[in-house]
Image (cartoon, grey):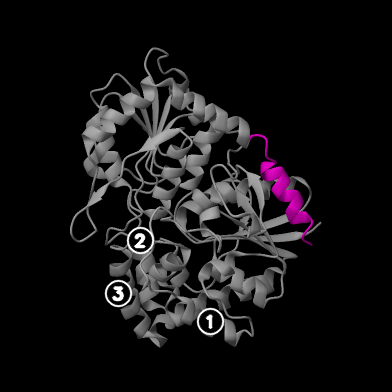
Amino acid sequence: MKKFLFTTLMSNDLGLLTRSLPIARELRDRGHQIAFCNPAKTPTKIISDAGFDNLHPKWPLLYITSGDTSLPSLWRLFRSKHLKRDLGFLVSLTRLVKRFSTAEHWNIDHSMYMVGMGIENNVRAHVNNLMELISEYEPDAVVDFCSPSACIAARASHKPLVTVIQADVHPQSRGFIWWKEPPPDLPTPVPAINTILAELQLKPIRKTEELLIGDKTLVVGMPETDPLPDTANVIYIGPILWQRADEKLPDWVANLSKMKPVIWLYPGNPQYLAWSRTPFDSSVIIYACIEVLKDMAVQVVLSTGYHSLPKDALPLPSNFRHASFVPGLSMAERSDLLIHHGGYGSCQTGLFTGTPTLVIPTYSERESNARRIAAVGAGDFVLPTSDASGRKKHVQAAEVRDKVNRILSDLSFKENAMRMSERLRSYGGASYAASLIEQSV
């Protein structure tokens, strides 16, 4: 038996958890011991429900960067001795929130700068606490899902590192906005990161993406939907999607009429920060779809991944039903159309089940995923527009209505989605990934 520590970029949503849990389950079924590290509220529930240990770093600032922005967490942060030692960090955090709320994210290097890795003390605290956690748990290897800090901690702790990434975060990719040339003066966290790497006697990097290359690097998806150059030295593992074996759809979903199309609306987290809008927020998707779908002859299942609905979205129209959570693969198979925020896992779910998709992406990485879906003819997308501040988004209802009608009436979308499903199913998925991870130790 081996011990594996699964680390993820700490965000309060389901995306990276639905990618890591199937691999963890496969390894557990083979007799290995698995622990996770993600203290955010929603991942904590999903990890617990799946029966895995979830190890929490000790420094409370990690809860802030993970999306836990409740008043109790903010109060604990304010009272913490760590904050009192470095009030300059609070100033930096305030500036960070403003910056984070208004900018495009061109690639993972730029994105990590936007979420605070350009602040030395932030990087140092994350890495040191993860190193302490690794020392206490003593894993045989670290399996990481897009956490640069965890990758640094694994290397500094001299642990084998397997990374599971999207193609868009590989150093040889064109990043999230691959259809445009990036501006020449993008801010980067590399100086701050290299300071920490030097302290740990690790080699410097040129861009953050280099941290996400492990001793073995696995890429989810397949070349048709997630292209990389032949020189990338990665292993494609196909779709990694999570659903517990005992999970079933609610009875009321099974009883939906066969005479009207079923649309699964999954916006993701409506609002990540309690006090400010961010590019990740998806409440705009809910409002637009209510406006469009309420008068259409369709049945809408709205789920929010254990997040609350915005109060001003209530009451829902009569053809809507809300569930805090539904098992994704089963719900996608029952649906005629998926409408979602463009998260990678949601895109893969639609492709895997052969269900056409309309994506309303809320920031750059999700727009990249949406464009990949459209490129293979398995769906389409509608881009939100922003006001001058970049904080308030709007979705054109007429465009959503036109594209919903087109996807439901044009059989080519379903045919292309089924063709992609057949290709994806030819890859090894979680079982193949588990075998590759076993070989790393």
Q: How many marks?
A: 3
Please provide percent x and percent y for residue 331.
49, 30
Mark earlier in primary sequence (1, 3): 3
Magenta extent = 425-441
Q: Amino acid at mark 1?
A: Asn
Mark earlier in primary sequence (3, 2): 2
Mark earlier in primary sequence (2, 1): 2
Q: Amino acid at mark 2?
A: Ser
Residue 235 sits inside the magenta stretch: no
- Give the distance between the C-alpha atoms of the residues marked 2 and 1, in whole angstroms: 32 Å
322 and 91: which is toward the camera = 91
Q: Amino acid at mark 3?
A: Arg
Please provide percent x and percent y for residue 133.
62, 71
Q: Counting other residues with Cα less than 10 Å from the Cα at mark 1, is it few (<14), some (14-19), or many (20 or more)? A: some
Q: Which residue is mark 3?
A: 95
Q: Which residue is mark 2?
A: 70
SS class, disc 3: helix
